[in-house]
Amino acid sequence: MTDAPVAFLGLDPETRADLFAAIPGLHRWYHTQGRDLPWRRTTDPYAIWISEVMLQQTRVTAVVPYYHRWLARLPTVGALAEAPLEEVLKLWEGLGYYSRARNLHRAARAVVEDWGGTIPADPDAFAALPGVGTYTTAAVLSIAFGADLAVVDGNVRRVLCRLVALEADPRRAPHAAALDRLAQDLLPVGTAADHNQAMMELGATLCTPKVPGCSTCPLTAVCSGRALGDPERYPVRRPRTAVPHHDVALGIVFHDGRVFIDRRPYGGLLGGLWEFPGGKVEPGETVEQALHRELAEEFGLRVRIDTALEPVAHAYSHFKVTLHPRLCTYLGREPRVGEGNPWKWVTPAALEDHPMPRGNRKVLEQLQRSRGDDRTTPGTG
């Protein structure tokens, strides 16, 4: 162990020694109490990589079925590299943060082109792949190859903050760096695979944000937050800011039994996904006025608005939207490419084959329920 990380956090040598001495008990707890998760039954770096990327910002229970479907269809890095991006996005549909899927696709192609299809075990080489950062590098290489790299995700950060009762925002640069060094300092050489998974498991199942299970925690005897009587105080939280909300007009435009959809630009939010056209309702506009304006501005579409469906609420990471879907009839004039976005007319049944944002999928599900789930009849898409 080194002196630098703990010195910054104000830990004395005795506290340092006590923390390190408690780590073997954490490992034993993990071996007896850790959850049986599918990605813990393999040392395949590709499968572990997929699981780690899926688990970012996503609950374990949501990831499990996606993980199985993904590996059934794309079992190797080579299969992922060869797959069309649209298929990759369809497999990812519903997990959110779609840049993760696009980066995995780009990274797989880089592994095939630059490394002959073998995922590099060298940290610098792996970290250079598209979308791979410090966390992913440490997680994949420690679990798959035993590299002595400490993982610090949100769960581990919370555990560390409570262990040392950090009275500062752990996301600010100096404190974040100090926690990273402390995590590395507490990693016994040669145990990285078990140690990292044990720390993440502790944060996910016992050292939770609210009502932590201190009575059964293997580190409770050395936890300063517990000793001070208020472990939930840590980590120190930033003041919450108001989450912006937008009303969005959405047009489900029919023509000769087909529905109009367009694809979002790859470089932006929800890039590469197909959606029903529309846009934000500006101040002073009705939903209908906004929809006519957006369809005309983006695609030159002229429509008749026929029916209003129920609004659909949806939340993203930094803002919320209420979608206001309207069934529309196309009134002619060939659509033009909107802001470089491809568009097409598809049958209602074919909508199932296109990756779509979750909000749009909610609209589609509502429409199908209202029409008896007849996905082949015009107006049910």
Image (cartoon, rainbow, N blue to C red):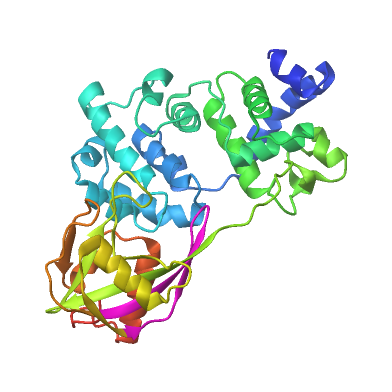
User: At which x and y percent is residue 158?
Assistant: 68, 40
* Residue 31 is at least partly visible in this image: no
User: At which x and y percent is residue 195?
Assistant: 59, 30
Q: Where is the C terminus found, in terms of image quarters?
A: bottom left
Viewer-closest of 302 and 19: 302
User: At which x and y percent is residue 292?
Assistant: 30, 73
The outermost residue toward the front is 284
* Residue 124 is at least partly visible in this image: yes
* Residue 138 lies in the magenta stretch: no
- On the rendered structure, is 321 left or right of 117? right
Who's the residue at 64% across and 43% down the image? 203
Viewer-closest of 22 and 373: 373
Who's the residue at 20% across and 26% down the image? 113
Quadrant in the rendering for residue 336: bottom left
Viewer-closest of 312 and 377: 312
- On the rendered structure, is 142 left or right of 224? left
Bounds of the magenta span?
307-328
Q: Is residue 102 above or below residue 325?
A: above
The outermost residue toward the right is 228
Dominant secondary structure of the magenta stretch? strand
- On the rendered structure, is 192 left or right of 133? right
Count of picture labels: 0
Q: Is residue 90 above or below residue 106?
A: below
Q: Where is the N terminus found, in terms of image quarters?
A: top right
User: At which x and y percent is residue 369?
Assistant: 34, 82
Q: Is residue 89 above or below residue 295?
A: above
Who's the residue at 42% across and 81% down the image? 310
